[in-house]
């Protein structure tokens, strides 16, 4: 008896006209999105459930994906990816925590995907030409106009929560933190809870008066998707909050803070996505390995006289961190809460805790 699953042909069509043939995985619908690659060897569940990938087709450079199955406690949020590209999808996961196959997860969450394509060649194309739109489809389209014209709009509004939620502290409550949800990963909330923080999560549409009205000890600015300059409303509200209480921003929160302080952001050629990005601490001199997921970067020179650059990417020298003297505010581009790792920079949460306690200023 043939126990192999029936393979359906699928195509990955890039906006430069290149076509790759593979087999269909996940949902059978066609989908268009911005094609990006991530270099993490593990953490595919966190990637699939990270709201920061909203509007994007995600491709893994690691050749085998799905080998430890699906583990729901590891989810970071609701999946927002437009598609999924892998070299090989494991059909027989083996892990004591596994709840099932990744293929089933893709189908249940209506995520179209393709397997069996040369992800190394596609990665080289993106590195040389930059991120580009792509389409996962059952039939190659006659033209490229629809693919080229795709653009993700209102990404943060799409993934941000619509109501205020409160997450209790683990153990004794030491501080009350207001978290601005621009597409927040759950592990940011967990990292704060573990340090004795009650976390009140506000949607991106929340006004400064509402946030400051709960008398928070500090404000956390989350990660999120899309072009940071698109978030005109949240940027205006941040202008009213920075300097009032200690502020810590991660990823999109880092970018929005820079814009609120009068700085600029720029789109990177192919971004930083993966768990192996080296970042140099300009103050301490040490280099850390970090997890990242972003396509835009802060232009540090645009903040001269306003902020101080604290971290840079060791590969391309792009800005990875800023602090704003006299404002009790610091931000980083990478993810100190990364799960499943690395966790080298988790001490930044401890710095935020000390700021709320009044023992450290930035």
Image (tube, rainbow, N blue to C red):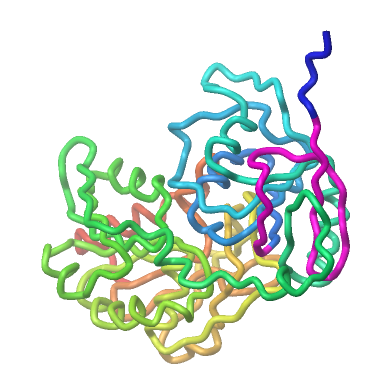
Residue 283 within the segment the image draws in magenta: no
Q: Position of residue 193 (x, y in %)?
A: 28, 44
User: What residue is rendered at 23% in x and 37% in y?
Assistant: 170
User: What residue is rendered at 79% in x and 54% in y?
Assistant: 12
User: What residue is rendered at 53% in x and 41% in y?
Assistant: 109
Looking at the image, which is closer to me, 290 or 241? 241
The correct choice, above or below, for 302 with respect to 78 in the image is below
Can residue 209 be seen in this snapshot?
yes
Q: Is residue 144 left or right of residue 255?
A: right
Q: Quadrant of residue 272?
A: bottom right
Q: Position of residue 135 (x, y in %)?
A: 73, 59
Q: Is residue 261 left or right of residue 48?
A: left
The correct choice, above or below, for 196 with respect to 351 in the image is above
Residue 18 within the segment the image draws in magenta: yes
Image quadrant holding the N terminus, namely: top right
What residue range appears in magenta? 7-34
Determine the main secondary structure of the stretch shown in magenta. strand
Looking at the image, which is closer to me, 342 or 143? 143
Q: Quadrant of residue 362?
A: bottom left
Can residue 342 be seen in this snapshot?
no
User: What residue is rendered at 62% in x and 26% in y?
Assistant: 101
Q: Position of residue 160 (x, y in %)?
A: 37, 60
Q: Is residue 349 left or right of residue 289?
A: left
Q: Position of residue 227 (x, y in %)?
A: 53, 74
């Amino acid at each position: 008896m043939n126990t192999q699953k029936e393979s359906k042909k699928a195509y990955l069509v890039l906006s430069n006209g290149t076509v790759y043939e593979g087999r269909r995985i996940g949902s059978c619908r066609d989908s268009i999105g911005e094609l990006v690659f991530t270099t993490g060897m593990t953490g595919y569940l966190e990637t699939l459930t990270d709201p920061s990938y909203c509007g994007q087709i995600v491709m893994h450079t690691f050749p085998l994906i799905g080998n430890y199955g699906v583990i729901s406690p590891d989810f970071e949020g609701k999946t927002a990816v437009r598609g999924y590209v892998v070299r090989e999808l494991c059909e027989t996961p083996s892990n004591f925590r596994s709840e099932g196959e990744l293929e089933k997860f893709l189908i249940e969450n209506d995520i179209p995907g393709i397997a069996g394509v040369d992800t190394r060649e596609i990665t080289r194309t993106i590195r040389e030409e930059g991120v580009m739109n792509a389409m996962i489809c059952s039939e190659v389209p006659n033209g490229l106009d629809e693919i080229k014209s795709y653009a993700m709009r209102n990404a943060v509004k799409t993934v941000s929560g619509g109501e205020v939620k409160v997450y209790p502290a683990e153990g004794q409550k030491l501080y009350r933190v207001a978290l601005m949800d621009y597409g927040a990963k759950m592990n940011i909330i967990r990292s704060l809870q573990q340090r004795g923080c009650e976390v009140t999560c506000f949607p991106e549409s929340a006004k400064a008066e509402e946030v400051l009205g709960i008398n928070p000890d500090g404000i956390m600015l989350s990660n999120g998707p899309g072009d940071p300059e698109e978030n005109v409303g949240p940027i205006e509200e941040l202008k009213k909050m920075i300097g009032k209480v200690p502020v810590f921003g991660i990823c999109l929160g880092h970018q929005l803070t820079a814009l609120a302080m009068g700085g600029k952001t720029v789109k990177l050629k192919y971004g930083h996505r993966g768990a192996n990005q080296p970042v140099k601490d300009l103050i301490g001199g040490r280099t850390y390995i970090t997890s990242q997921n972003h396509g835009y970067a802060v232009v540090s020179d645009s903040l001269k006289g306003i902020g101080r650059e604290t971290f840079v990417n060791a590969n391309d020298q792009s800005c990875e961190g800023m602090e704003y003297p006299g404002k009790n505010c610091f931000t980083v581009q990478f993810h100190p809460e990364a799960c499943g790792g690395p966790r080298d920079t988790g001490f930044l949460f401890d710095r935020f805790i000390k700021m709320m306690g009044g023992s450290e200023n930035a």
